[in-house]
Image (cartoon, rainbow, N blue to C red):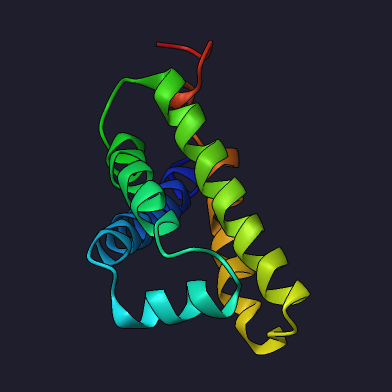
Amino acid sequence: MRLKTIFYWITTILIAFETFAGGILDLTHSLRVRDVVASLGYPVYVLAILGICKIPGAIVLVIPGFLRFKEWAYAGISFELFGAAVSQAFCGHRSELITPVVLLGLTLVSWGLRPPNRILGGAS
């Protein structure tokens, strides 16, 4: 059980940090992020939408409570990373697939390893 908790926190902190940092980069319209979004054919304003959603999502993953928001955060992060992978694949950027796929895997591991007190309807 202790090992499960350690892996939960490692994956959760990695995903929360990446999501928070990504949200900051999205909101500041980082040159790299702008280039990626443009190469995928998305408008730059989508970065503001993603950034505004990513930052609270990352925060809610690591703070206690807010179980329903945690579920929404995991769903949103998974959807964003799946969308990133599919977008890269459809645009023929196969070398860019690894990052969103690995991050999606970490997100799913974090979600799957949640302790009962971090599961909606789980033990308090």
At 33% across and 45% down in the image, what residue appears? Answer: 58
Percent from the top left, x then y, of residue 108? 60, 48
Q: In the figure, is residue 116 to the left or right of 81?
A: left
- The image shows residue 11 at horizontal and vertical percentages of 45, 55
Q: Residue at x 34, y 53 (%)?
A: 48
Q: How many marks?
A: 0
Q: Is residue 65 above or below residue 1?
A: above
Give left or right: position of 24 versus 96: left
Name the quadrant of the C terminus: top left
Camera-side residue of 21 and 35: 35
Residue at 34% of width from left, 63% of height from top?
22
Q: Quadrant of residue 21?
A: bottom left
Q: Nearer the viewer, residue 44 or 87?
A: 44
Return the residue nearer the eye: 83 or 47.
47
* Residue under the image location 56 percent in, 37 percent down: 75
Residue 19 appears at what percent x and percent y? Answer: 37, 56
